[in-house]
Image: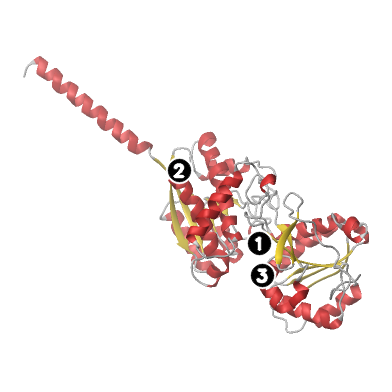
Amino acid sequence: MSIKMGRRLLGATLAAAAAFGLATSAVAQEKKLKLGVIYDLTGPLAGGGSELQYTGAKIMIDDFIKKGGVEGYKIEAIYADAQSKPDVAINESVRLIEQEKVDILLGFFSSAQCVPVAARVEQLKKFMWITTCISSAVLENKNYKYIFRPQASGNQFGLMTMDFIANNAKSKFGKEPKDLRVAIIHEDGAYGVDVSKGNEAGAKKAGFNVVLKEGYAATAPDLSALVTKLKRARPDVIFHTGYNPDITLFARQAREQGLKFGALVGHGAGYGVYEKLKEGMGADANLLFNTDPISIWLSKPEGLDPKLPPVIKQVGEEFDKAKPGMAIRSAHAGMAASNIYVLLTEVVPRAIKKYGGVDPEALRKAALEVDLPEGGTMLGFGVKFPADGSMAGQNERSFPVVIQYVDDKSYVVWPKSQAQRDAVLPLPKGTTYSNQ
């Protein structure tokens, strides 16, 4: 073989090797973000809101997939069904982490699932982003490093309603907070106890005169003894956390025994289903208050970061396609979409750009640096996570909103940044429960 031909062969070999190296490098450099998404798609929790949470989550994740991912990382989402069972939620979480090798575990509708799953995920030192469940017990005094919840917690519901009444004490009731008589009643399960703790803390902060605090079994067949205690206590405002039919039972027996007050303030659960309230209370459901995360479609655009209203519009259009014929766009869907949007626009990009990837430590550091003011999310609140303390990992800027039912419609009345109208306080003279 001639020297010239040898040189040609060597050049061709080197070129081929270089091309192979480039191809190998390109494959090696293809980066992926794997999301493990768990909601209840079957079982009783599915129809209770979890399947709608899944819908909102998928809308947001699919949008980022269409856009090509985040900071050069392609997104792959693996969905799992918790089947409305805590043990299934735990098993699916472990499977997604250990077998599917997901980088982030997100979702979770039920607090009964969140509590054990969070403990297991922390033990495995993986990153968990909770979009939905609210029980404070998930994070309280756990000091987890890798579990984060942008969503409001149960005790924040209780704090929010106390803040609402405190800010209206003088102008609406004509009383200083210290002279306002309040009662806190609640079903004695995990949800009711959690919210009542927030009520207590908020009452102490406001300086209210708490004249009664009492729990009861949600399945109790008779609440007349509780009503009798309330009559003796003469509260201006009753803060109530209950389901149904206990709310209906309480309202009926309060009417029968002639209980009077200035306002009845509920906290999600049964107070969030107006049709049931109206069915059980008739016209007396008018002017009740409820506390829940806002629907993104009720958020005041002028109170939000300017980039968010177009996103809300897009999510709404996609929701209409996914759920044609639904009269009202689900607040659950908007909640999941908003919380995942924060993850994919604030946490993941920062982890990649500043900390070099999407490993749990990079994600943790990035999450702790998120600093969004009020109006920085589609849900109206900001985002800031404490690194330690009794509620490490809980968004301390999150909040639900207080709505009031007025003539078969709901209006946000607190906080001011999201309020659609002024609250009607106290109950007008002549209405069933009015103490005027």
* Earlier sequence position, callout 3 versus callout 2: 2
Residue 386 visible? The answer is: no
Q: Is the Cβ of the residue at disc 3 closer than 8 Å to that at disc 1? A: no
Which disc number belongs to residue 317?
A: none
Image point 14% across, 20% down: which residue? 8
* Earlier sequence position, callout 3 versus callout 1: 1
Does residue 8 appear to the left or right of 34 in the view shown?
A: left
Q: How is the image coloured?
A: secondary structure
What x and y, as percent, mark residue 33?
Answer: 45, 45
Tell me the residue that label 3 is attached to. 273
Tell me the residue that label 2 is attached to. 67
* Earlier sequence position, callout 1 versus callout 2: 2
Q: Residues within 10 Å of mark 1 (few under 14, many from 20)?
A: many
Residue 44, relative to residue 161: is it above or below?
below
Tell me the residue that label 1 is attached to. 135
Image point 53% across, 68% down: which residue? 46
- Given the image, on which type of amino acid does mark 3 rest? Val
- Given the image, on which type of amino acid does mark 1 rest? Ser
- Given the image, on which type of amino acid does mark 2 rest? Lys
Q: Residues within 10 Å of mark 3 (few under 14, many from 20)?
A: few
Secondary structure at numbered mark 2: loop
Residue 254 visible? The answer is: yes
Residues at marks 1 and 2, CA–CA distance in whole angstroms: 34 Å
Q: Quadrant of residue 5?
A: top left
Image point 64% across, 52% down: which residue? 379
Closest to the camera, between mark 3 and mark 1, is 3
Query: Quadrant location of the N terminus?
Result: top left
Does residue 29 appear to the left or right of 368 in the view shown?
A: left
What x and y, as percent, mark residue 378?
Answer: 62, 49
Q: Quadrant of residue 400?
A: bottom right
